[in-house]
Amino acid sequence: MNSERILCVGLAALDIVSICESYPEEDKDVTAISQHHQSGGNACNTAKVLRDLGVQCEFLGSMSSGFQSDFIRKEMNDRGILYENCAYHSDCGTPTSCVVLSLKTGSRTIVHARNNLPELDIKDFEKLDLKNYKWVHFEGRRNELKILKMIDIVDEFNITQPDDKKIKVSVELERPRETLWPLLSRGDVVFISKDFARFRGFSSPVETIKSLNRYTKPTAVMLCAWGEEGADGISSEGDLIHSDAYPPEKVIDTLGAGDTFNAGVIYSLYKGLTLQDTVNFACLLAGIKCGMYGYSGLA
Ligand code: ADP
Ligand code: FRU
């Protein structure tokens, strides 16, 4: 019997977050209002939000050993996120981000180091029992060619399945990297970030969606979130959808707003909502997230 599990494939990192009145000047010694550690990484963040929404969820990515990865796994355990198929590596560190949240502007500045942790390999994906999953979400990372092969594996599985048992595939093109381009044509749901869109020379979500839609599968849905401007999407029939953002009373933590938006979209489409309701819901969820620290208690 197939499970209803959603698999999020990508990065789990340690985020060290400093909450500051404003973004510090270079070479100053400033005092933060507070600091905390939390798990991070796009796929991990999306998994956390999906889990909060009540979905059975698994994270798949590389993991190192040491107290940082123990911390990440403990958070996943506490939240009920499965991670049983992760690939373990020794002699490397855990990807870590130092993040400054500025209360003055609502910005989140990230300094990230991968610390030599290898990316996920095809063999790590091959060992999955795909019958366990209803949806696989791929964060576009530096192992793009391997991700394409992983999607091939899902496609081959889907050929053997009746329509209601086929796995949906979503892909995220977030980093400004040309090499992510081939992922565009491989998702049933395609997320384009504003960073990737700007890198391609677009200046609005609607322009991005209209221009890139021709490169997706004919049946695909594409979405592009754009901070305070909300998000746009296009259905497989070519209908353009927009939702304004839902600004919280005070923007205090925009770290992972895009990951939250993605989770909101995956959740709503998985539940069978229309694309318009989906984009509205995802913007609402991401807006609520921006008004609170972290990801707990969103739902
Ligand atoms: P990221 O930079 O994390 O990839 P975005 O900044 O594009 O993501 O934001 C994703 C979504 O989060 C937006 O579509 C919007 O709905 C919401 N969001 C982001 N910033 C704000 C904000 N300042 N106020 C309200 N909603 C926001
Ligand atoms: C937010 C985030 C952080 C992580 C960083 C990695 O989207 O996933 O949690 O540290 O980006 O680039």
Image (spheres, helix red, strand yellow):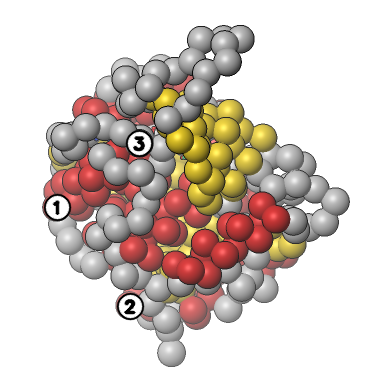
Q: Which residue is mark 2?
A: 164
Count the labels in the image: 3
> Seen from this angle, which residue lies furthest bottom?
1
| Up/down of 103 relative to 299, above or below | above
Local secondary structure at mark 2: helix
Q: Residue at 82% across / 56% down in the picture?
A: 90
- Where residue 277 is drawn, which disc sits there? 1
Q: Check the picture and name the quadrant holding the C terminus.
A: bottom left
Q: Residue at 59% across / 47% down in the picture?
A: 13
| Tag 3 near tag 1, CB within 8 Å | no
Q: Mark 1 belongs to which amino acid?
A: Asp
Q: Which numbered disc, 1 or 2, marks the residue closer to the eye?
A: 1
- Dividing the picture into quarters, in which one does residue 152 lie? bottom right
Residue 71 at what x, y percent from top left?
61, 58
Q: Residue at 24% across / 28% down in the picture?
A: 228
Q: CA distance from mark 3 to mark 1?
A: 24 Å
- Where residue 93 is drawn, which disc sits there? none
Whichever of labels 1 and 2 marks the residue nearer the N terminus, that label is: 2
Q: Which residue is mark 3?
A: 253
Give ligand 1's quarter of the image.
top left
Local secondary structure at mark 1: helix
* Mark 3 Cα shell of 10 Å, populated few (<14), some (14-19), many (≥20): many
Whichever of labels 3 and 2 marks the residue nearer the N terminus, that label is: 2
Local secondary structure at mark 3: loop
Q: Mark 2 belongs to which amino acid?
A: Asp
Q: Residue at 61% across / 9% down in the picture?
A: 27
Residue 250 at what x, y percent from top left?
21, 32
